[in-house]
Image (cartoon, rainbow, N blue to C red):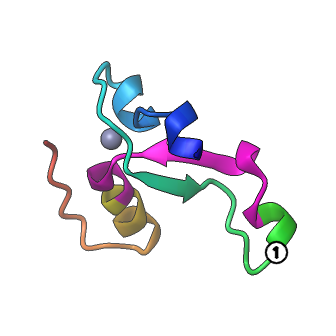
């Protein structure tokens, strides 16, 4: 539903590319807070690559970013 209204990855869009979004990412960690979890204003559409990249960065990752 969310992805139907927000079909493109926001990170790719910032870089001038239109990539179909496949993942809904929570901008704010919801930590089990259901109100936060379902607040669509805190969601952003991402493609899998950007989501993986963002997650890797937030987890500390290994600094190995593959740009596609
Ligand atoms: Zn993307």
Residue 30 falls in image quadrant: bottom right
Instruction: Note whether 36 is above or below 10 in the view shown.
Output: below
Front position in the image: 56 or 62: 56
Instruction: Note whether 43 is above or below 56 in the view shown.
Output: above
Mark 1 residue crowding within 10 angstroms, few (<14) / some (14–19) / many (20+): few
Q: Position of residue 24 (x, y in %)?
A: 51, 54
In the rendered view of the protein, which quadrant contains the C terminus? top left
Q: Which residues are magenta?
A: 37-51
Quarter holding ligand 1: top left
Q: Position of residue 46 (x, y in %)?
A: 42, 46
Whether the magenta-drawn stretch holds residue 6 is answered as no
Which residue is depicted at the point 43% across and 55% down?
Answer: 23
Residue on which disc 1 sits: 33
Which residue is depicted at the point 41% across and 65% down?
Answer: 55
Q: Position of residue 29 (x, y in %)?
A: 67, 67
Q: Position of residue 53 (x, y in %)?
A: 32, 57
Front position in the image: 57 or 18: 18
Whether the magenta-drawn stretch holds residue 39 is answered as yes
Front position in the image: 47 or 58: 47
Q: Say whether residue 13 is left or right of residue 18.
A: right
Residue 48 falls in image quadrant: bottom left
Which residue is depicted at the point 34% across and 47% down?
Answer: 47
Q: Say whether residue 43 is left or right of residue 15.
A: right
């Amino acid at each position: 539903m969310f992805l139907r209204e927000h079909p493109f990855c926001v990170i790719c869009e910032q870089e001038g590319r239109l990539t179909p979004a496949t993942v809904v990412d929570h901008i704010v960690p919801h930590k089990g807070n259901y109100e936060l979890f379902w607040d669509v204003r805190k969601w952003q559409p991402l493609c899998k690559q950007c989501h993986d990249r963002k997650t890797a960065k937030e987890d500390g990752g290994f600094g190995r970013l593959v740009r596609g």
